Amino acid sequence: MRQGYSGPAAAPVLGNVLMVAIVVAAAYALSQGLTRASFGYTMGALAAITLFALVFVRTDFGLYVVVFSMLLSPEFGASGAGIAEGRTIMVRSEDFILIVIGLAWLAKTAVNKELGIVAKTPLNRPILFYVVANIVATLLGYLMGNVNGMSGFFYVLKYVEYFVVYYMVVNNVEDRDHARRLVIAAFLTAAIVSVVGIAQIPSGERVSAPFEGEIGEPNTFGGYLLFMIAIAAGVALETHRLRLRAMCVALIGLMTLPFAFTLSRASYLGVVPAFLVLAWFTRQRKFMVGLVLLLVVCSPILTFVAPTPVTQRILYTFEPERGQATVRLGRLALDPSTSARLISFRAALEGFLRRPIFGYGVTGFAFMDAQYARVLVETGAVGLLAFLSLVWAVLKSGMASFRGLGEPEDRGLALGFVAGTIGLLVHAIGSNTFIIVRIMEPFWFFAGVIVMLPQLEHDALSPRQAPAAAPVRVQGPLRLPR
C-alpha cells in the first residue's frame, strides 16, 4: 500500500476534523460579528454556517430547505456598476441557500471520494449544451460591447443555479418513499402560497406570490400555479386511491382561485394545452373527453359565472389605448401589453438576422418579456437549438417515465409534469418563463424526481418482479448516504 493512501476508513476522520473546523468557524463568526458587524449580518453568517453543518451531516435536510424556500423566501434587488439599465438583478434568500448547500455537498464529496458530484442522466448533455451556448454567446457579446459589465454573467449564473436543484434531487433522492415525501413538501408549499394569494384578493390588486417586494409578479405566480395544478391533476386522474384523489382535487380548487385572480393571460392560455395533454394520455380519457365537451357546451354560461376582473382582463386584450403602440390583426386592435410583445418578436427577428449564430449575449439586447424572442436574439440559432433540445429531452424523459412506471401515483406525477411543461411552453409566448426563478426551481425539482422514478421503482422490485418494459436508466452515483 502506498503511503498517504486515503480510503473509506479515512472519511470519518476527515469528517470529524471538518465538523470541528465548522464549529470553530461559527464561534469565530459569532464573536467577531457581535463586536464589529451588525446583528443581521452576524445572524446571517451564523445561519449559513449552521446550514452548512446540517447539510454536511444530513443532505436530505438541504432538499427540504430548498423545496420550502422556492416560493417562501424574500427577494431584494442588487444593482450597481456594470448592471445594464432595466436589468436589475434580483437576489433571493434561496440563492444563498443553494450556494451554502452546494458548498456543503462539495465538501462531503471531497471527504468521501466514493461519492459523485453529478449523476449521469438523460438530461446531462442537453443541459451542458444549453449552459455552454449561453456562456459562449454572453462572452462574445461582452467582447463586442453588447453586454455591459458583468450583468450577463450574473444572469447565466442564475440559469445554472436551476440545474443545481435538479442534480441535488437526482444525486440524493434515496427511494420512492423519499421522493414522495419531497413531492408532498412541494404540494404543501403550493397550498401555503395559495392561501396567501387568496388573502390578497379583497385588495383588488392582481394576486402575486408572497415576498415579492413592492412590485409583485402576477404572471410569474400564474405560471407556477399552472404547473402545480397540472401535476396535481395528473396524480388525481391516475391514482386509484379515493382519498388521495380527493386531496388532489381539493388542492387544485385551492390553487385555482388565486390562479384566476393573477389575471395572467399567458397563464390562462397555458391551461388549454395542459388540459388537452391530460385528456389525451390519461387512463381516464372518457371522463376527460366528456369534461371537455361539457366545458365547450357550457362556455357561454362560464363567461357570465367567471369573476368580473377575469373577464375584463381577457377582453382588455382587444382594447387599444391612444398614444400607445398598437398592433392590428386584421380589424382587431390589440392592447399595449400584447402589442409590445408582438413588436418585441419583430425586433428580435431583426436583431437575429444581424447576428444569427450566437446573438448579442445574455442581457446584450433590449429587454423583452417573451422567452422565444429573447433566446433567439440573445443566443442566436445555437442558443435556440440548445434550448429546444433541452425542452425536447425533458419531455422525452417525462413520457418515458409515464409509459414505463407501474405505480398509478407515479404515472400521474409524470403525466402532470409533461402536461405542465407543455402549458409552460405556451406560457413562455408572453413571459420569460424558463429563466424565472420561481417557476424554474420547482420545474427542475420535479424534473429530477420524474427522471429518477423509473430507477427507484426498478430498485424496489426483485429481478423476477421487474416489469417487461425496460426502465429509464440513470447510471452513476445516485445519492449521498445520510
Image (cartoon, rainbow, N blue to C red):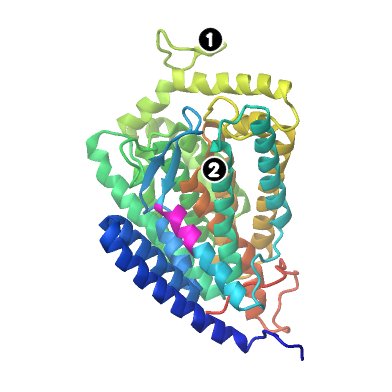
What residue did someone put label 1 on?
Answer: 331
Q: Is residue 447 above or below residue 6?
A: above
Q: List x then y, in percent, for residue 434.
A: 56, 42
Residue ID at (61%, 86%): 10
* Start-end of magenta stretch: 93-100
Q: Quadrant of residue 110?
A: bottom right
Q: Quadrant of residue 151?
A: top right
Residue tagged 2: 154
For label 1, the SS is loop
Mark 2 crowdedness (10 Å alpha carbons): few <14, some 14-19, many ≥20: some
Q: Which mark, residue 69?
A: none
Nearer to the camera, 52 or 431: 52
- The residue located at (67%, 84%) in the rendering is 6
Q: What's the residue type where badge 2 is placed?
A: Phe
Query: Who comes first in sequence, dot 1 or dot 2?
Result: 2
Instruction: Tell me, yes or no, whether the two marked residues, 1 and 2, touch with CB atoms within 8 Å.
Output: no
Q: Answer whether residue 295 is visible to the viewer in this image.
A: yes
